[in-house]
Amino acid sequence: MMIKKMTALALLGTMLATTHIIAQQRPNIVFILADDLGYGDLGVYGQTKIKTPNIDRLAREGMVFTQFYAGTSVCAPSRSSLLTGQHTGHTFVRGNKEIAPEGQEPLADTVQSYATLLKQAGYATGAFGKWGLGMVGTSGAPDKKGFTTFFGYNCQRQSHRYYPTHLWNNNEKVELTGNDLTQKKVYAPDLIQIMALAFIMDHKDKPFFLFIPTTLPHAELQGPDDEYYKMYEHSFEEHAYKGNDYGPGAKVAGYASVEKPRATYAAMVSRMDAYVGQVLDRLDALGLTDNTIVIFASDNGAHQEGGADPLFFNSTGGLRGYKRDLYEGGIKTPFIVKWPGKVKAGSKSDFVGAFWDLMPTFTEIGGAPKPRYTDGISIVPTLLGKKKQATHPYLYWEFHEDGGRQAVRMGKWKGIRQNVMKDHNAPLELYDLSKDPAEQHNIAATNAGIVKKMSAYMKEAHVESDVFPLTGK
């Protein structure tokens, strides 16, 4: 009897040990999401004026995607698409709908996120930065969507301020009492970064999913007068007044009105790049690098707000459009994946994918339950260099401001429809991205068959929403 008992205990010990080994073999996942960073704002994607050595290092050690897209061209719906694995014709939040006094339209309680599924699979889950998908206490709050730890801006409207009065630590409001005119101010992104790095340390012994939706480089353009700003303080001075007739004192006027915003924007991008470097260094220091996937992307295209100058920096990489457009410059995102021993270092992929692909990708990598629904396909075969990668028949986007817009990418073709709320059968613009990546030549008139097919896809992909109506009342 004693022998049987000892055997049972030994067997239990072996099972527990095996479970621990399996848990350690499952990779950690770190997903860093920039805010309003353009496709061309990084060195690896052609940027020449702004220094991004850490993200460029990430690219050298991983895979760079050249045909990857955000959920749409503004914050909340793009992030909804990301978390739910659905394009904006299906996902719950499809626009930036504000709620007083703080917060946005919350994700419904029935909405499933990949964080919930990874949590069910035993992952520690944390989000640090900007949320914007439901205020504390609502069905869309981070803790209701799978994150056991959240620190940052719950409300994306509040995140426009880099020296805010408060942040949120899970459901606790954290007052930043120094953020007034008489006391030392707290630069919120720095504080959020400290908490994100602490999360890695706290969960180094079990699989974790770390989501860092940083607010950088979203407007307002603001940051401390430190090493990152000084790096660019006079870099663009010669451009600030050259070619502009400011009259007497042109240099001073030009510097004040143009140079400072440019320098600040560049400093914000470089600060974000430094945060990426800190994450990589922390993983190295803890011996976690070889078992961690690190992914970097942006939530939409480059912005023109708060003095930002995307034309000067070529932030779109030569693509047409900016934030709020469904042209390539508004939705195409830098997308980089590092996974040591799995993803070939220094590789590139032209796989045509989008944010909704991350739901099936993350759940497959993490051994999590399959999602109840998704518009995405797993990109694991591409990451592992396998040939049998499923592809999309088409990608679809909606935009619910400025009269409403729809877009479809089908192979080399890109179709865009404007003013959809007024006329959901409005004329469709058509571009051949293989010959015209900057979308300069509308060839709809000579490709009636393609236009008809695009229109059918737009109708098929859009399911009308009572909360965010587009084609109906």
Image: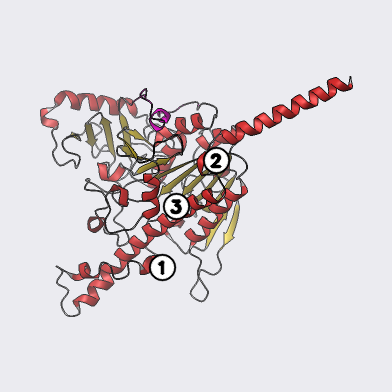
Q: Could you tell me the amino acid type at mark 3?
A: Val
Q: Residues within 10 Å of mark 1 (few under 14, many from 20)?
A: few
Q: Earlier in the sequence, mark 2 or mark 3?
A: 2
Secondary structure beneath disc 2? Answer: loop
Q: Earlier in the sequence, mark 1 or mark 2?
A: 2
Q: CA distance from mark 2 to mark 3?
A: 31 Å
Residue 26 position in % (x across, y down): 55, 34
Q: Is residue 390 magenta?
A: yes
Q: Which residue is mark 2?
A: 139
User: Start and end of the magenta stretch?
Assistant: 372-391
In the image, what residue occupies the spot 32% across and 70% down?
233
Q: Magenta part mainly helix, strand or loop?
A: loop
Q: Which residue is mark 3?
A: 276
In the image, what residue occupies the spot 56% across and 46% down?
287
Tag on residue 164?
none
Q: Quadrant of residue 330?
A: top left
Q: Is residue 385 left or right of residue 416?
A: right
Q: Which residue is mark 1?
A: 227
Is disc 1 in contact with disc 3, using a CB cutoff of under 8 Å? Answer: no
